[in-house]
Image (tube, helix red, strand yellow):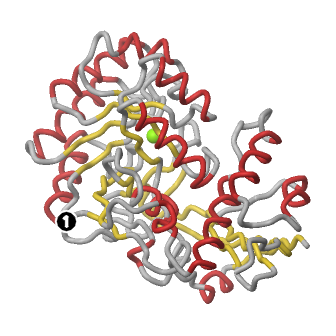
């Protein structure tokens, strides 16, 4: 095998997908919630990076800026680290991290060239990934509407599907007593042998709200409390202050961009668990750097959202606990475009095994074939760079 594998062409295929019983939340219109009979139009794209070695990297996602395409064409696809740092520098003003899909595609190419799954290149630590069922936000439409609805759904996730853990995204802008009641109702419903997490996703208005819910998390022995402050989890000061009042571990960093900023967050003492994600932190290379950063500080890294690349990363990280399987809801069956023929890879509620775990693909690269019959039947366009 040559040590130089030149990038020759990049194709981004766009497709559309509709999700039944889902709509945008009415008051603000920023969050997806359950609504019976509604249909939410969504879509996605697949990026294919072709090389002169006859191997292509193929990954979900990939809206590329022209200057990134110009830079990539003709470059050696095996020089992931050099490409990562070059693209990090060019993105220092906006977002601050290299485009994740590009990096994942390069790992896919490397895996295919070596004939091994990506996790085998990264190291390999585990094959089974324990999951938490991660819910949609609460709604006013008879789905996740009452505190007991969350409790009943958590119990179903535990008993019917075997999930060892459950994470609630609560309501947006409702009286805080309802959120407190949901936190307590879930623990009452599932008993002690399920880990429970809470992610308000920046929905609370006051420090008093943050504190009241945090004290409920203490009472109900929550595994972590994530991004409670209005707008999202940015302030190290705010979280360091919060942890003087409550005991529940804090998860932080989903919206903190950049390796250096994650380090600053850790050094401030604000986080017990640190977030990383391939889409927002620069692909697999970026996630693994944050994992090592966390490891060196005795912290666990928790990956944001699912996806095949996260399965390979989590399979190779010691200091992590759960795979985020979501978003899920008791009344919404198919939340993902079926871009893989095998439902196991789609992160649906029933994609887990009897122990509530998902598998790591064993094929070369990302290790799973795309369902091009489905993608082509729903294709809305294609962008070709060469
Ligand atoms: Mg979150």
Instruction: Please say if 245 is above or below 19.
Output: above
Q: Secondary structure at mark 1?
A: loop
Image position of 298 (left or right of 305): left
Residue 65 quadrant: bottom right
Residue 214 quadrant: top left
Along the line of sight, which residue is nearer the eye, 15 or 305?
A: 305
Instruction: Please say if 245 is above or below 305.
Output: above
Question: Which image quarter has ligand 1?
Answer: top left
Instruction: Please say if 365 is above or below 157.
Output: below
Q: Name the residue tied to disc 1.
A: 355
Circle 1 Cα neighbour tier, 10 Å, few/some/many (<14 / 14–19 / ≥20) = some
Residue 210, x across and y down, in percent: 37, 19
Residue 239, x across and y down, in percent: 42, 18
Residue at x 52%, y 54% (from the top left corner)? 23
Along the line of sight, which residue is nearer the eye, 201 or 145?
A: 201
Ligand 1 under 8 Å from disc 1 Cβ: no
Quarter holding the N terminus is bottom right
Image position of 153 (left or right of 69): left
Q: How many marks?
A: 1
Residue at x 35%, y 59% (from the top left corner)? 125
Residue 258, x across and y down, in percent: 63, 34
Quarter holding the C terminus is bottom right
Residue at x 63%, y 71% (from the top left corner)? 110
Residue 84, x across and y down, in percent: 71, 50
Along the line of sight, which residue is nearer the eye, 260 or 223?
A: 260
Q: Can you name the residue that lies furthest to the bottom here?
A: 373
Along the line of sight, which residue is nearer the eye, 230 or 37?
A: 230
């Amino acid at each position: 095998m040559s040590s130089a594998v030149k990038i020759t062409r990049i194709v981004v295929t766009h497709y559309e997908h509709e999700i039944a019983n889902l709509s945008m939340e009415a008051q603000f219109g920023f969050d997806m919630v359950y609504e019976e009979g509604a249909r939410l139009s969504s879509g996605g794209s697949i990026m294919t990076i072709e090389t002169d070695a006859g191997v292509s990297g193929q990954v979900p996602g990939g809206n590329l800026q022209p200057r990134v395409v110009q830079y990539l064409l003709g470059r050696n696809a095996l020089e992931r680290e050099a490409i990562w740092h070059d693209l990090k520098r060019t993105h220092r003003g906006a977002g601050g991290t290299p485009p994740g899909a590009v990096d994942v595609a390069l790992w896919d190419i490397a895996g295919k060239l070596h004939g091994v799954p990506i996790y085998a290149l990264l190291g390999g630590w585990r094959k089974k990934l324990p999951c938490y069922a991660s819910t949609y936000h609460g709604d006013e439409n008879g789905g996740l509407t009452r505190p007991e609805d969350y409790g009943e759904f958590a119990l179903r996730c535990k008993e019917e599907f075997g999930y060892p853990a459950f994470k609630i995204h609560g309501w947006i802008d409702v009286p805080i007593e309802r959120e407190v009641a949901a936190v307590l109702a879930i623990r009452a419903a599932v008993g002690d042998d399920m880990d429970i997490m809470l992610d308000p996703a920046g929905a609370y208005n006051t420090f008093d709200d943050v504190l009241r819910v945090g004290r409920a998390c203490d009472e109900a022995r929550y595994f972590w409390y994530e991004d409670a402050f209005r707008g999202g989890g940015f302030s190290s000061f705010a979280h360091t202050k919060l942890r003087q009042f409550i005991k529940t571990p804090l998860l932080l960093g989903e919206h903190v961009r950049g390796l250096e900023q994650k380090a600053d967050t850790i050094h401030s003492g604000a986080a017990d668990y640190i977030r990383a994600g391939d889409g927002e932190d620069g692909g697999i290379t970026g996630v693994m750097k944050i994992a090592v950063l966390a490891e060196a500080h005795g912290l666990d890294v928790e990956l944001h959202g699912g996806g095949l690349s996260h399965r390979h990363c989590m399979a190779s990280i010691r200091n992590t606990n759960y795979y985020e399987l979501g978003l899920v809801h008791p009344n919404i069956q198919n939340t993902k475009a079926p871009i893989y023929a095998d439902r196991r890879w789609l992160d649906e509620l029933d994609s887990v095994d009897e122990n509530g775990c998902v598998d790591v693909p064993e094929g070369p690269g990302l290790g799973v074939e795309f369902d091009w019959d489905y993608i082509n039947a729903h294709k809305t366009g294609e962008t070709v760079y060469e």
